[in-house]
Image: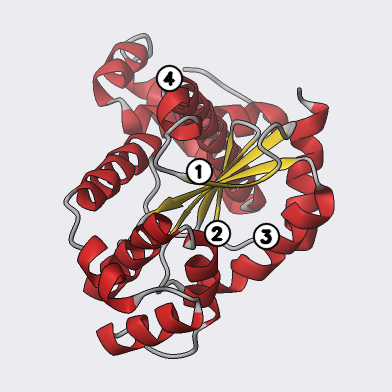
Amino acid sequence: MLRFRSLPRLALTALLLAASAVLQAPAAAADETARFNPADRAAIEQIVRDYLMRHPELVLEALQTLEEKHQAETQAETRAAIEARRAAIFEDADDFTYGNPKGDVTIVEFFDYTCGHCKRSFQPLMDFVDADGNIRLILKEFPILGPRALDAAKAALAARKQGRYLEMHRALFEHEGQLTEKALMEIAAKAGLDGPKLKKDMEDPKLMDIFSRHYALAEALGIEGTPAFIIGGEMLPGAVDKERLTRVVAEAREGR
């Protein structure tokens, strides 16, 4: 029978990680545990159980290590997905581009006009791009929160035919209240748009083709909510403010 007086802390953490792997891969685990006889396996299990009772913090450490490993793997997969779809992400002529077209850092935003986090991110993002002066911002409509979100996105893209996409984009995010059909026409009027022409242009089937491409791209990149940003080849989910943008853009420039 195996006998262990004590196990080093690092060894126990490693053992916990191995145990987690065993749970995730029972077939492989059967091969590994076959090297021990039943008595030895029982002894190991009892040692681990007793040690964890005295040092429960090791469970948290092991879980944290596993989470960090999972995050690193996810980030690597996302970087690979971004690299494989560079043309669709950074060179789609149907996407509106703001800021410096030759900027040394590109920010891509997937957004929904009815998303509260998108609304809160709007002004800090625009101010940051304006103040920096060397950023290219690519805007990708990603209406996922219902029919009103879809209509708002259609209105924004349709406004490009009147050369007033940015005005409509800003007005939609600055609007307080529901984006009903009536509200969209009022917002369009304030943004200097011809309402009847906008309504007609919103029916252009090409708009749904654009959204379909954005949906497919988001799925391939693992984007499940809004806003979501790509900065320097890295995925950045969730709302942004000046501090977060400053840090991430600086990291992107350092990594170039």
**Which residue is label 3 attached to?**
125
Q: Which type of secondary structure does the marked residue at label 2 adopt?
A: loop
Against 180, residue 18 (above or below) is: above
Q: Which type of secondary structure does the marked residue at label 4 adopt?
A: helix
Q: Which type of secondary structure does the marked residue at label 3 adopt?
A: helix
Q: Indicate left or right for 156 with 26 as reference.
A: right
Identify the amino acid type marked 1: Arg
Does the image show residue 146? no
Identify the residue shown where x is 44% and y is 71%.
115
Q: CA distance from mark 3 to mark 2?
A: 13 Å
Q: CA distance from mark 1 to mark 2?
A: 40 Å
Q: CA distance from mark 3 to mark 4?
A: 26 Å
**Which residue is label 4 attached to?**
84
Front of the two marks 2 and 4: 4
Front of the two marks 3 and 2: 3
Front of the two marks 1 and 4: 4
Q: Which mark is residue 198?
A: none
Q: Which type of secondary structure does the marked residue at label 1 adopt?
A: helix
Identify the amino acid type marked 3: Leu
